[in-house]
Amino acid sequence: MAFGNTFLFENWDERESHIALVCGDRSCTYGELHHAIIAYSEELYDLGVRKGDHVAIWAFDSINWVVAYFATIRIGGIATLVNFNLLPQNVTVLLDITNINFLIYGDVFAKRDNVHAVDELISAAHIDPARTFDISLASVDLIEKYRDVALSTDHTADYDDGETAFIVFSSGTTDIPKAVELSRKSVLQNAVASYIRLRHDDELRTLLIPPLFHVYGHD
């Protein structure tokens, strides 16, 4: 199983029409999810994302978040997962630490009190607005957007299992953020472990409570 096709297990054809994710009043099948991941990754590639680029994801948990995450790492980008509770000035510090090239953003708590929060972050972090992508639910449903889009190209990146797939931040015992790099192999192993638990029980469901920006959200 290739990393770029994390969802394509040996019985993929049997599960393609099964529900993969439910978030609020939205849901998608494994087939819809996989299709959207490929289509969005191709759009990110067309917009300039290349292997090794650091792509920050600052948004509430959603199906769009999952699509953006896997689309980023499919084409070799390094997904940098940002706490949706943080204010722009706090996020700026994290983006500086990780040399962010692109920003994918959605709904975050800062926008509830300040509609200009994202603009302030883009300005403070010196990110080219052309390299920012809005995945807020009010703006786009990535499953619906790509539902009828033909998948005619493939820019799945070549990679080594030990290369970084995503970055999370941990303060440890101090208030200084630390960027923790996790490998592509670790992502694949987590996916395989989850699949082994689920593959023999089509009725089994998993409730994910930790936020997706947190490392426990990947277990």
Image: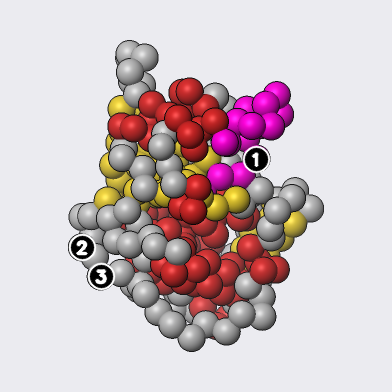
What residue sits 37% from the left and 75% below the top?
155
> 25 and 105: which one is in front?
105
Judged left or right of residue 123, residue 156 is: left
Quick check: can you spot residue 108?
A: yes
Judged left or right of residue 96, residue 68 is: right
**Residue at mark 1:** 107
User: SS of the residue at dot 1?
Assistant: loop
* Residue 113 is one of the magenta-drawn residues: yes
From the viewer's perspective, is residue 122 above or below residue 51?
above
Mark 2 to mark 1 CA distance (whole Å): 33 Å
Q: Position of residue 202 (x, y in %)?
A: 63, 67
User: What range is drawn magenta here?
Assistant: 104-119
**Residue at mark 2:** 160
Residue 158's mark? Answer: 3
Mark 3 to mark 2 CA distance (whole Å): 7 Å
Q: Amino acid at mark 1?
A: Asp
> 52 and 66: which one is in front?
52
Quick check: can you spot residue 212?
A: no
Mark 2 vs mark 1: give the one in front: 1
Q: Amino acid at mark 2?
A: Asp
From the viewer's perspective, is residue 7 above or below residue 117?
below
Identify the residue at the far top of this view: 174
From the viewer's perspective, is residue 151 above or below residue 35?
below
Mark 3 to mark 1 CA distance (whole Å): 32 Å
What residue sits 68% from the left and 58% below the top?
140
Snapshot quadrant of residue 210? top right
For the N terminus, which image quadrant? bottom left
Q: Earlier in the sequence, mark 3 or mark 1?
A: 1
What residue sits 27% from the left and 51% below the top?
164
Q: Position of residue 173 (x, y in %)?
A: 32, 14
